[in-house]
Image (cartoon, rainbow, N blue to C red):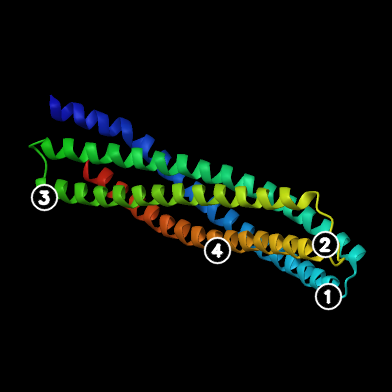
Amino acid sequence: MKSKLFVVIVVFLSPFVSAQNVREAAQNTAQIQEGRQMLARDVRELEEFDDKIELLTLMFDSKNQDRANVIKETLLLDMMKEVRQSGVKAKQARIEIAQSSAEVRSDNREVRRDRNDSADGGRDRRDDKKDLARDKMNQRDDRRDRRDDIRDFEAQVERAEKQKEVLDNLKMAHLKFGYFSRENAMAKKVLIQQFRKTMVEDIEATRRELGEDKREQGEDRRERRDDRHERNERR
């Protein structure tokens, strides 16, 4: 009776597992495509930001106060856009945590199923142990991926907070190159460089996350192949 009940449970869960695997594959592919587009955009925006910083430096050197303030205002617009984009990235990172958590829960169900399968005396115990070891490896991989997603989210939030802090300090600033005010103007220029640093860090994080997504894509392919093998074994 116990064996028949287990077979019924497996048959019932198989379509659910297959649908979830397809959904995870689609999510991973979409994340990679979005990551590539985001990386290309961020690299382009950094190059444009650098061009404006170079021009601002020339205005500092020539003490062209009016022109320097015009350039500063265009940099502020760029910073506002970056802060908005960082907020969107943080929301996306939170979604990825939810997705990786769902994968871990799915792994936990498969490991429990393998243990129940192993407890069924009418099956091949050696094959059952192999299935359990394989699913435990998938479980470890997905738990690591979830830790990576949490780390990425926390780092993104921290960068967004730094960017907003710099932006708030620059919003009301007016660059003056007089004898008593030039030091303050130089301090504002340092803040702009600090903001640039967060943009570079953001690009590095996107590159790293793309690598993680590609690794996860390979792991998901292996998990889908393993699931197919396990379903075939029970037919």
Q: Nearer the viewer, mark 2 or mark 1?
A: 2
Q: Are marks 2 and 3 in contact (CB under 8 Å)?
A: no
Picture disc at residue 181: 2
Residue 139, compared with residue 8, is above or below; it is: below
Q: What amino acid does circle 3 point to?
A: Arg
Distance (Cα) linking label 1 and label 3:
76 Å
Q: Picture coordinates of residue 93 (x, y %)?
A: 53, 46
> Disc 1 marks which residue?
61
Which mark is first along the chain, 4 or 1? 1
For the point 24% across and 28% down, which residue is it? 8
Residue 107: give its label: none
Q: Position of residue 91 (x, y in %)?
A: 58, 42
Residue 74 occupies which quadrant of the picture?
A: bottom right
Q: Nearer the viewer, mark 1 or mark 3?
A: 1
Give me the residue at 92% from left, 63% from top: 66
Q: Nearer the viewer, residue 13 or 71?
A: 71
Q: Point out residue 199 in the picture as x, y percentages from the top left corner.
A: 64, 60
For label 4, the residue is 204
Quadrant assignment, res 184: bottom right
7 or 53: nearer the eye?
Answer: 53
Spatial CA span between label 4 and label 3: 45 Å
Report the amino acid beneath label 1.
Asp
Q: Mark 1 and mark 2 in contact (Cβ < 8 Å)?
A: no
Q: CA distance from mark 2 to mark 1?
A: 15 Å
* Residue bearing the label numbered 3: 126
| CA separation in Å, label 2 and label 3 | 79 Å
Residue 54 in the figure: left or right of residue 195: right
Front tag of 2 and 3? 2
Left or right: 43, with 54 as reference point: left
Q: Nearer the viewer, mark 1 or mark 4?
A: 1
Q: Which badge, 4 or 3, is on the more N-terminal residue?
A: 3
* 1 and 4 marks in contact (CB < 8 Å): no
